[in-house]
């Protein structure tokens, strides 16, 4: 096995993705809206296509805006349909994102003659290629450091999410826990909902453009759920999920390099392996978490301490 | 990099866009071409099956399970290929690949249920985890397969995902078989599935194997999803499972009708979508089918007979207007009654000052004026010049009737408070509709009147109202 | 008939149970995580009694019912219905879940819900026949809402929905009934109808366990009471068990509740 500078950058980019996703991801998991990341990442297709058809170029910023707007619209439409028609939220999410995806597909077919706009790239991403696109280089001592554009983008998104979570920590917390309580305390729970949705949309769009959407979905949900099994405190959960995600990114890349040769293949995709690694870490927590793990639950069910060993409170 | 399935889907249609001639339209709609017939029939049957199964999924509040399941099929395809290739074949045997897809799909769904049942992780997060991790695993396996030196794995994904336009007889037979199974299960297990979706706990207390039923239902979903993958593609089969069922829900409150309607909407969407796609070659069939189904959904959302937005909003608006009219007429009547009582006469239709009406209840002038305008349009108000108003003949009769009903109702509530509570949720147009005629007669007799009883509670005189209520 | 009351976790020996009691619970313990929800429940319910299960919030009243019906896993213990394990005696047991446990927007009519009580009799794959609908209709009639049989369930009031659930249990034609908070958030008329129904069942010699939270009506409705707070504080005939001392031990030092209990006690009409 050989490790290059590029490998380090890939891990750094993966870790930045993990951190950027972990922050909104925790709130998604707590609000039971985990599938929103999946929905948004599929639904942005028409945003990309329209931005392209309007401007006629593949400038990534216009496409970013187009996609982010459609991403937020996905959340808005989902909300409308479920409240207007009393449709189950999961179902209305499914209807909205599949419809937008189909629309995007039609638009892209119309545009396909003019440009190579590859919807598959959106889904899979190619984190391995990101190191080729260098945005900034500087000298540190003897060596030149070449910072890939992806690292800059994801670093900014992570920073953006961090600022929002720090600034609105208690508002996000209370409206995730109890929207009605939040409203009685003068916090606009609706605003917090859409702020979170905007965060998810921006993160999803920015990240899948560079690393692919499947890794974004994995990083949004899985580390947050893993952290949820390990702690009851929101602050700690945010921190843990960021660490777990970053760990999965590093391990995932390592496994992507190590495993295929072991079983007789040339190589495999790092994005996919990072997603798989988040899953492996989740399974570990699911089985062995000290308090909420499966095994600890099985044990505790049989081994209950009597609350009546002492005198009764009223005696 | 992996050739993406969707690129394969789009590349099927890169010929120029010419409007089809009438002759072609006719040939497509009447299914005269063998190939078109196959495609249209196949998507129609898929629509029927997924509409049926989707209903139970929707009612079980597991609509997105199709999403998790369809993503979880990816590793199965890669693994099935590896297994078949290592056994000496080309690895591209359709049924083998579908079996692989079904196996990992079902494993994925079972993982969702296991994680949910054995930890504090909820449904949504469990689905998100399974979806992304399994799909990631699929990418890992497929990219390893594609990097195999022999290279015969190329196009493996497009072999599986979304090749509507190039369906063959084998696909049609497969789809028909799955649809038949779905239909049979829905018929045979209708009451078991109903119980599963409506009241799991009660079902379990009766000894039904709830987990087993869940697995059967999800197995059906897996079958439909896997055969649907090749017909309409990975994402769009998800829509086929959700949209027709959600659309059907707006039209009926009966599960059986909902099932029939959902299957019909699915079938018609498949038929329309495939036909349109056959006529306009630049439109991929999967996408068009989903958009047709979405159009059905949006139409149903607004115009659905039992739960549509227009109907429920209209009902709300009508109720609001009715209540407004009744309040206005009753207020006018009570003012007239009080004024006549002062002079010792029975209530008569006399003109009353607008000011009194405002004082009678804490209404805003704009609100009252609006109600008055409506009452005038309905010929309940004879004259209103901004200062005073008088009811028309029919308006006075209506006001007397409303007041009488209102007071009978109040007396009924007071004297029969115990039974009344079970009636109050009804939309009572008049007391007679809620109470039996006998009871109304009894009430009238007990109150010793056929005319209008006095209000059992004190109607506050105008002067009591705080002055600042009138602007 | 015996009155049991426990002062410690130690219980009476298991052979103390009568073999033919409609329901006997042996050393039942239910835990969630490390937190026990029910501890060493050991009870015999005598035949033909109308039994109230009373205790503060979180005392495990619903859990007790669910554990008896095998709906939740238990840490230890055994539940017997007429001397046999519950699984063999399902036909003799009727269940009324909490009203909030289902989605009342579901596209079925009141009659459909009541026929669900007969699904077990109808059996796998067979469809609901006319005679089943007749049984369901007469069950609806017994709770006084036969005229609402074809209404979709979301168009019923809370009290009517509760009656539908009761009718479903009646259709089961059981001899032992479990009812989880049937009086929660229902109107006065429904409450009265339910009480009449419960007394009917008792007069037919059937045994009914009812989770109840209104202390003021306990002595009026039930002839047998289980005072529960994670363990059985006391169980037995109402006039013997429903005492200020036992209530104090069930509810602890909660003064408002004690005041309520005192009020309730003052209303008991001793024969």
Image (spheres, helix red, strand yellow):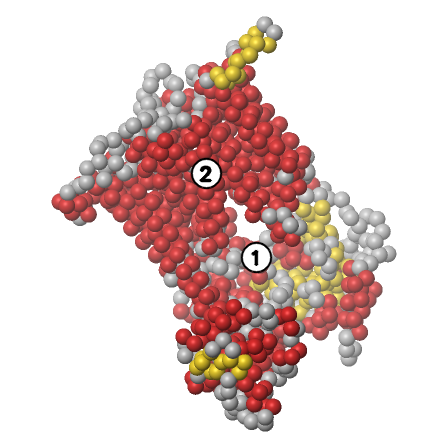
Q: Quadrant of residue A55?
A: top left
Instruction: Quadrant for the N terminus of chain C, please.
Output: bottom right
Return the residue at label 1. C101
Label 2 and label 1: CA atoms lie apart by 38 Å
The residue at 49%/59% (across/down) is: C105
Q: Are marks 2 and 1 on the same chain?
A: no
Which residue lies at the image location 45% right of the left edge and 80% below the top edge? Answer: B383
SS assignment at label 2: helix
- Tags 2 and 1 touching, CB below 8 Å: no
**Residue A285: where, in percent of width, then height?**
61, 33
User: Foreground: A76 or B204?
Assistant: A76
Q: Which residue appears farthest toward the top when viewing the image?
A: A142
Residue wearing tag 2? A69
A171 above or below C159? above
C42 or C193, nearer to the observer: C193
Q: Quadrant of the C terminus of chain C?
A: bottom right
The x and y percentages for residue C151 are 45, 68
Disc 2 or disc 1, which is closer to the eye?
A: 2
Compared with residue B130, is residue B435 higher up or lower down, i.e. above or below? below
Q: Disc 1 sits on a residue from what chain? A: C
- The answer to whether C193 appears left or right of B385 in the picture is right
Q: Position of residue A139 (x, y in %)?
A: 57, 9
Residue at the image point whose x is 79% and y is 52% from the top: C9
């Amino acid at each position: 096995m050989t490790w290059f500078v590029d490998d380090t950058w890939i891990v750094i980019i993966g870790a930045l993705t993990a951190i950027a996703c972990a922050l909104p991801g925790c709130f998604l998991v707590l609000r039971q809206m985990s599938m929103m990341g999946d929905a948004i990442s599929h639904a942005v297709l028409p945003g990309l296509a329209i931005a392209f058809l309007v401007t006629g170029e593949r400038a990534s910023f216009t496409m970013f805006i187009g996609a982010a707007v459609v991403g937020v619209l996905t959340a808005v439409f989902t909300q409308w349909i479920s409240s207007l028609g009393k449709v189950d939220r999961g179902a209305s999410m499914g209807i909205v994102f599949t419809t937008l995806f189909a629309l995007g597909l039609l638009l892209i077919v119309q545009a396909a003659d003019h440009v190579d706009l590859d919807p598959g790239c959106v889904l899979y991403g190619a984190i391995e290629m990101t190191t080729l696109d260098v945005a900034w280089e500087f000298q540190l001592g003897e060596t030149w450091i070449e910072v890939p554009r992806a690292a800059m983008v994801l670093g900014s998104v992570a920073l953006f999410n961090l600022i929002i979570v720090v600034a609105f920590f208690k508002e996000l917390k209370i409206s995730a826990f109890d929207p009605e309580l939040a409203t009685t305390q003068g916090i606009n729970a609706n605003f917090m909902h859409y702020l979170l949705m905007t965060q998810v949309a921006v993160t999803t769009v920015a990240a899948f453009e560079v690393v692919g959407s499947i890794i974004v979905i994995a990083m949004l949900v899985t580390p947050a759920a893993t952290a949820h099994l390990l702690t009851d405190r929101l602050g700690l959960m945010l921190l843990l999920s960021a660490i777990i995600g970053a760990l999965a990114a590093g391990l995932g890349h390592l496994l992507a390099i190590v495993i295929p040769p072991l079983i007789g293949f040339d190589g495999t995709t790092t994005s996919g392996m990072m997603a798989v690694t988040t899953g492996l870490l989740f399974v570990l927590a699911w089985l062995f978490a000290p308090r909420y793990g499966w095994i600890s639950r099985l044990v505790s069910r049989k081994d209950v301490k009597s609350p009546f060993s002492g005198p009764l409170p009223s005696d | 990099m992996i050739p993406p399935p969707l690129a394969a889907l789009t590349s099927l249609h890169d010929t120029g866009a010419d409007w089809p001639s009438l002759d072609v339209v006719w040939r497509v709609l009447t299914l005269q071409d063998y190939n078109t017939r196959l495609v249209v029939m196949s998507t129609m049957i898929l629509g029927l099956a997924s509409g049926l199964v989707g209903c139970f999924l929707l009612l079980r509040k597991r609509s997105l399970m199709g999403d998790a399941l369809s993503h979880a099929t990816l590793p199965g395809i890669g693994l099935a290929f590896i297994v078949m290739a290592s056994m000496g074949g080309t690895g591209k045997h359709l049924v083998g690949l579908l079996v692989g897809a079904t196996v990992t799909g079902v494993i994925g769904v079972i993982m969702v249920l296991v994680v949910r049942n054995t930890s504090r992780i909820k449904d949504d997060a469990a689905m998100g985890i399974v979806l992304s991790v399994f799909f990631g695993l699929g990418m890992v396996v497929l990219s390893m397969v594609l990097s195999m030196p022999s290279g015969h794995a190329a196009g493996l994904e497009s072999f599986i995902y979304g090749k509507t336009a190039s369906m063959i007889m084998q696909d049609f037979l497969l789809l028909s078989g799955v649809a038949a199974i779905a239909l049979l299960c829905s018929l045979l297990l209708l009451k078991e599935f109903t119980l599963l979706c409506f009241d799991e706990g009660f079902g379990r207390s009766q000894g039904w194997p709830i987990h087993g039923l869940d697995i059967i239902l999800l197995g059906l979903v897996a079958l439909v999803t896997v055969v649907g993958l090749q017909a309409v593609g990975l994402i769009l089969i998800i829509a086929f499972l959700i949209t027709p069922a959600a659309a059907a829900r707006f039209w009926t409150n009966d599960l059986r009708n909902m099932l029939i309607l959902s299957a019909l909407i699915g079938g018609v969407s498949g038929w329309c979508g495939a036909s349109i796609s056959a006529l306009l070659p630049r439109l991929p069939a999967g996408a068009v089918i989903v958009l047709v189904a979405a159009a059905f959904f949006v139409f149903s959302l607004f115009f659905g007979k039992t739960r549509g937005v227009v109907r429920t909003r209209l009902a709300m608006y009508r109720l609001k207007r009715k209540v407004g009219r009744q309040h206005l007429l009753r207020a006018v009547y009570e003012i007239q009654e009080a004024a006549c009582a002062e002079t010792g006469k029975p209530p008569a239709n006399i003109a009353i000052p607008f000011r009194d009406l405002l004082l009678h209840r804490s209404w805003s002038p704009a609100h009252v004026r609006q109600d008055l305008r409506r009452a005038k349009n309905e010929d309940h108000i004879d004259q209103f010049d901004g200062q005073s108003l008088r009811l028309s003949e029919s308006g006075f009769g209506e006001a007397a009737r409303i007041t009488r009903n209102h007071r009978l109702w109040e007396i009924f509530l007071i004297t029969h408070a115990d039974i009344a509570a079970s009636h109050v949720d009804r939309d009572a147009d008049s007391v007679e509709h809620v109470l039996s005629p006998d009871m109304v007669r009894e009430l009238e007799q007990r109150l010793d009147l056929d005319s209008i009883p006095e209000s059992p509670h004190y109607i506050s005189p105008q002067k009591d109202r705080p002055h600042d209520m009138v602007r | 008939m015996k009155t049991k009351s426990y002062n410690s976790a130690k219980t009476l020996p298991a052979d103390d149970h009568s073999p033919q009691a409609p329901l006997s619970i042996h050393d039942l313990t239910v835990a969630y995580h490390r937190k026990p929800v029910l501890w060493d429940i050991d009870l015999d319910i005598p035949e033909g009694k109308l039994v109230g299960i009373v205790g503060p919030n979180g005392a495990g009243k619903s859990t007790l019912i669910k554990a008896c019906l095998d709906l939740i896993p238990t840490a230890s213990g055994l539940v017997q219905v007429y001397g046999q394990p519950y699984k063999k005696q399902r036909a003799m047991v009727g269940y009324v879940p909490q009203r909030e446990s289902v989605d009342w927007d579901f596209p079925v009519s009141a009659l459909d819900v009541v026929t669900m009580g007969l699904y077990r009799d109808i059996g796998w794959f067979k469809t609901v026949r006319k005679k089943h609908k007749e049984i369901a209709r007469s069950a609806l009639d017994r709770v006084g809402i036969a005229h609402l049989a074809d209404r979709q369930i979301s168009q019923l009031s809370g009290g009517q929905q509760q009656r539908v659930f009761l009718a479903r249990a009646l259709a089961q034609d059981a001899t032992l009934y479990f009812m989880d908070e049937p009086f929660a958030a229902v109107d006065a008329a429904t409450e009265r109808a339910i009480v009449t129904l419960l007394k009917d069942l008792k007069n037919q010699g059937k045994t009914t366990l009812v989770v109840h939270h209104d202390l003021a009506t306990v002595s009026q409705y039930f002839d047998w009471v289980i005072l529960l707070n994670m363990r059985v504080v006391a169980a037995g005939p109402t006039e013997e068990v429903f005492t200020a001392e036992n209530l104090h031990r069930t509810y602890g030092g909660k003064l408002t509740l004690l005041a309520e209990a005192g009020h309730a006690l003052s209303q008991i009409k001793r024969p």
